[in-house]
Image (spheres, helix red, strand yellow):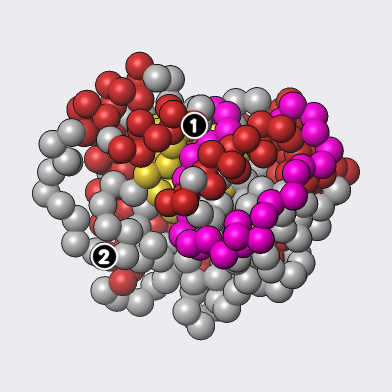
Amino acid sequence: MAAARRSRQIGARALQIFSDNPTAWRRRLEAPADAAAFVAYCAGSSIRVAIHASYLINLAGSREPSASQSRAGLVVEMQRAPLYGATLVNTHIGSHRGVGAEVGLRSIVESVRAVLAASPPGVRLVLENSAGGGDLLGSRIEELAEIMDGVGADADRLGFCLDTAHLWGAGYDISSASSAVAVIDRFEALLGLDRLAMVHLNDSRSLLGSRTDRHEHVGAGQIGAAGLGALLRDPRLASTTFIMETPGADEGYDAVNLRRAFLLWGGALELPELPPKAFRTNRRSTRVAPRG
């Protein structure tokens, strides 16, 4: 409930939450006692709710018991989403763990089909692109398209999330307006923009193509204001849910980053410099959105 109140206080129009401990398989048997009040508050405040699934879920893995646990865990997230008023469940795609991309992609397709078959019709499964480190899959838009095509007829409730820091780590130069728009053009050509359910609007501390994922304040990292602003202003993404996972939420930088995103959305080409202390914040992410 505190996250919902904070979202309204700073003017966010969407909120991404964890429904339970994101680093454990064990799930609570019931939703929290204030879940109904949370849903009513978000609805009354026009705040769109998305769930980020457990970090342990690995759809690309084929080894047991992890593969079965991943499917079952994601089904739980999907089935419980309505209890939080959520229509989107975002998950990392995962790692093939050394068995090869072909086997990993096959595992993803099988897992997605199984999860969708066991999930309520009003909830959309959203797969997030990766930075591509190690054996992670889903770093290329072409791989995302391959997953969608593999799921086939069952893909009507499948969407995708483009994390800008992950795009950057994977080698997509989105630092200029033209290059950022070109990435959206590519996604549109291969998957269709109706499949782009979410954008994680994060700047990056990592080098382009480094295959690493280190989030930074909006417009204060390696990507910068021009590319992120172009994504926010792209009229094709007007109905896409934008979520920020930027540092320093506990220190008030969620509001700072939201203001910076609104400035970019409004047409600003440059942003005010942040004080040195902004880069010494708690690196844990905040998950609020500049617009729905």
Residue 121 location, x and y as percent?
34, 31
Look at the image and tell me in which quarter the N terminus lies. Answer: top left
Q: Is residue 231 visible?
A: yes
Residue 144 location, x and y as percent?
61, 53
Asked which quadrant contains residue 118, the reply is top left
Of residues 252 and 239, the one nearer the viewer is: 252
Look at the image and tell me in which quarter the C terminus lies. Answer: top right
Instruction: Give the residue number, with chain letter if any, for mark 1.
Output: 10
Give the extent of the magenta segment: 265-292
Residue 21 location, x and y as percent?
27, 57
Residue at x 63% of width, y 71% of height: 212
Q: Which of the labelled discs sits on residue 24, or is there none?
A: 2
Residue contact at pointers 2 and 1, CB within 8 angstroms: no
Residue at x 66% of width, y 61% of height: 276
CA distance separating discs 2 and 1: 30 Å
- The three-letter code of the residue at mark 1 reads Ile
